[in-house]
Amino acid sequence: MTPRRAATLVAAGALVVGLGWLMFSFLERRLSAPTPDAEPVAPVAETPAAVGPHIAAMLYFVSEDGTLLEGRSMDVPLRDSPAAQARALIEAQLAATPPEPLTRAVPEGVSVRGVFLTGRDDAYVDLDGTFVSALPGGSHNELMATYAIVSVLTTNLTPVARVQILIDGREVETLTGHVDLREPLRKNEGLIRVP
Amino acid sequence: MLLCVALTLAVAGTAPVAQGPSPAPITIVSPQGRRSLTVTTVNGGDYLSLDDVAAALGLTLRDDRVTGTTTVAAGGRSAVLTPERNVVSAQGRLVSLAAPPLRQDGRLVVTPEFVTRVVGVLLDRRVDFRRAGRLFVIGDLRVPRVVVRGEFAASAAQVTFEIAPATEPTVTRTGSELVVTFAADAVDAAVPTVPANPLLQGIRQGDGASLVLATGPRFQSHRATVQPIDAGTTRLVIDLLAAGAETLTPAAPAPPPPAPPAAGAGDPGPAPSLPPPGGFRTIVIDPGHGGEANGTEGPGGTLEKTVTLQVSRRLKALLEGRLGLRVILTREDDRTLDQDARAAIGNNNRADLFVSIHANAAVRPTVKGAEVYYLSVDRASLESRRAIQQPDEPLPQLGGGTRAIELILWETAQLRHLEQSATFAALIESALRGKVEMSPRPVQQAPFRVLVGANMPAVLVEIGYLSNPDEEKALTSAAHQDKVALAVFEAIAAFRGRLEKPAQ
């Protein structure tokens, strides 16, 4: 290949890439720009539920008056085993943006280390230490966070009757000094607002 | 009176020993003797080499390269584990573990939970893990739990050992050391760190069932006093004296008097006038959190641990001054205290009531009002309910014969008092309602850890929401704190009145 031919090919390639970038930028602006008559979009769980099959699951948030948990149906990805479904539910609960006027029951930025089911109707939810460090204290906050996790599994997965929260792979006594986490907990209907 | 610096050294049964690069070893105590196991920290948790455990307990290990499993066997019993899997098959029964066995540097490591739950099945013997003393206790051995506390002044120091179940201690002086030997197979005690002082350099585990006090340069003599606290607990007090020094407390008569309910760590002394024995006489007030545990924090920077201590002190003054009750605070100052230790102070002092004082927080700053909690029974299994209904256990006593000993599992201690706890919670709610704002849900049940082991009516009072700016301001004011303390005082007085009311 002669030097002139090589230079021509490089220039042509650069032109194609540049045109592609311009087209992509234009389309991105068009697609993301709000239109004046657009309907407000209801907040949904920030999960990849929109892709692939999903289930409508009840996720839990703090009620408008701040005193109880309140359930909202949201899309959660369908998984092919109870354990995988349990993990998907916990991930959705942790990631979900609460619909107005509700607020988060669990701290932000918490990672799921594992979710395990036993043959005795128990589930173990292993969360990273952020679940403790980002919790601002107070027994009320601790009850809300704990029972949001307990409720999302006991409500949406029939075989699960009790849930134990582990932190960084270890059993803990409490999160911030109140709720006994040394054994699995059952759902507490008294903490959940009836619609 | 000496100006004392009172320090709680450590409490057996406190949170697990802090994890560091070189965690303290764990000791296996069995009828065959003692064996120390090296501990490795993995993901912040304690792990033991399975080879070490097997060698110490006579287990055989067999790896199956095809399935990737390891079989652990002893005496015809076996368990199959898979690294990284939380579920272990032990004698055909699945055991779910909080943390799985792992491969670490080419060897299998397991958690203490694996030893208690899986190895116990293989040995067909009870295996207890005593977290405070970092002991595995195999079989029926005498291993008392020892809570060690200390107070230090310039010319005197006092170290207190509370021993449960009651076990006879002996103190001998060997050179510059005092050796406390317990009539037991081993001792379950967290060895505390001693602050710098001229009388005591440190405390360490001794051989067998003993603890060793390394005395300091100013130490000259000691005095040891043994007092029974109740049927299940003995207290040993050792005064360390410098030349010409006064003791921290008046000398105890010798021989010791017959078991009066003994003071706890926070007991400042006798109440003005005690009611006759057998009546309603002792209250334990638990100021929530403390030390490293701040609890929640208000938007103005108010710490929960500070407010709870202030209110608790006001309540104590009211109860002592007006009712003449013996009142013990689980903590008198800003110190970290384990949840079990709080209930233990109530149990060891045979308290008639346990009141834990807390301040709350919610994500919405508008949430406000006081709440009263008693223990929810969600966690109580049928087995544990049956356990609390078991008859007293006849145990042999010194000099022949037997004595019926009331056996109560720690985990079920509160269950037998739930009805009275509910009554007491309602009385507090009623008294608070006239004085402070109440939450829309003023009386609730919850599985609160601090209430589980209290062997007496027990409640947790949330005196308001620090996350609410108005309530934060109120909770820091003396006038509001007095209102809260007065309401709880009135509820206690009303509760006492109900208990002591003669039958109609």
Image: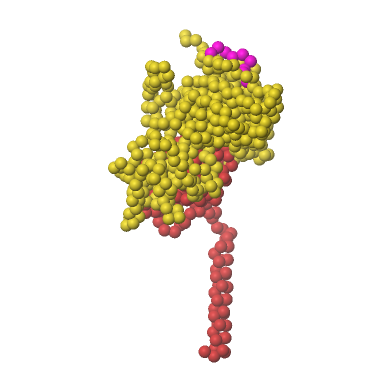
Q: Quadrant of residue A189?
A: top left
State the hue of chain A.
red
Residue situated in front as seen by the camera: A184 or B442 = A184
State the hue of chain B.
yellow
Image spot of residue B255 (x, y percent): 55, 16
Residue projecting furthest to the front: B175
Where, quadrant-wise, is the N terminus of chain B in this rendering? top right
Image spot of residue B386 (x, y percent): 37, 27
Give the magenta part as a residue range: B269-277
> Does any portion of residue B443 appear in the rendered image?
no
Above or below A137: residue B326: above
Residue at image position (57%, 45%) is A133
Residue situated in front as seen by the camera: A108 or B322 = B322
Magenta stretch holds residue B316: no
- Magenta stretch, overall SS: loop
Residue at image position (47%, 46%) is B38
Residue at image position (39%, 50%) is B85
Magenta stretch holds residue B275: yes
Image spot of residue B343 (x, y percent): 52, 28
Above or below B130: residue B89: below
